[in-house]
Amino acid sequence: GEDVEQSLFLSVREGDSSVINCTYTDSSSTYLYWYKQEPGAGLQLLTYIFSNMDMKQDQRLTVLLNKKDKHLSLRIADTQTGDSAIYFCAEFSGGYNKLIFGAGTRLAVHP
Amino acid sequence: SAVISQKPSRDICQRGTSLTIQCQVDSQVTMMFWYRQQPGQSLTLIATANQGSEATYESGFVIDKFPISRPNLTFSTLTVSNMSPEDSSIYLCSVEGQGGTEAFFGQGTRLTVV
């Protein structure tokens, strides 16, 4: 089956950049997504990238996609305590016609 | 973006009972999705609900356990039937954006079965 993998935990200092990595297996993925989940809340769509793009920037967020290696990353510049949350990578699998989520990366921001 | 409201936001239920979760969207959407997020885990798609047809269930999920209604283009319900503690999860409703590229989620229903 299709698989999306993420590291489970990342700790950064406030003001530093955070980089959350994700790998996926479905070469027919058309869109890849990053979601943020704060404690007790649903999923907030942060950004997404089309599979024919290499990079997308949106304010403090930069998404890089290496389609050859099936590697996706989310960079958060000037990380703040409010960025502490779980970040989910997801691919829209063309083969399965549905979103497939990674296990989520818990980002902890400390002073 | 779509605004999605789910009710209830949380509930504690006795085993053997059923709970119906409601999902209301502020715009008409063709497809609505129901996900389960077990404690400390990622999201798993339960089923896809199209208006006017029966829901399509993913492997491992059956209609008798998770009946779904989709009476119109802005509303859906998911029922968790004959609950056991293993059903304790967050259940999330999701819809596609207008362009079909985005997927938006409700705030989820946190279910605890005791």
Image (tube, coloured by chain):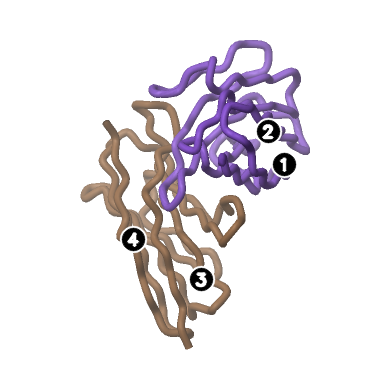
Chain colours: A brown, B purple
Q: Give me the residue at 38% from left, 44% from top.
A: A51
Residue depicted at x 53% and y 16%: B63
Q: Do labels 3 and 2 share a chain?
A: no
SS assignment at label 1:
loop
CA gap, disc 4 to disc 3? 13 Å
Secondary element at image label 3: loop
Where residue B26 appears, x then y in whole percent?
Answer: 78, 38
Up-down: is A82 above or below A5? below
Q: Which of marks 3 and 2 is in front?
A: 2
Residue under numbered circle 1: B8
Type of the residue with mark 1? Pro
How far across and how far down the image is residue A87, in percent?
A: 45, 59
Q: How crowded is mark 3: few (under 14 residues within 10 Å), some or many (20 or more)?
A: many
Q: In this view, does B29 lie to the left or right of A15?
A: right
Q: Distance between the residues labelled 1 and 3?
A: 26 Å
Residue type for callout 4? Leu
* Discs 1 and 4 lie in a common subunit: no
Callout 1: chain: B
Q: Provide the chain ID for the residue under circle 3.
A: A
Q: Do labels 2 and 1 share a chain?
A: yes
Q: How far apart are marks 4 and 2 (CA)?
A: 30 Å
Is A73 on the left or on the right of B22, as rendered?
left
**4 and 3 marks in contact (CB < 8 Å):** no
Give the distance between the C-alpha atoms of the residues marked 2 and 1, in whole angstroms. 6 Å
- The residue shown at (38%, 29%) is A94
The chain letter for the residue carrying disc 2 is B
The residue beneath circle 3 is: A84
Which of the pair B64/A74 is nearer the observer? Answer: B64
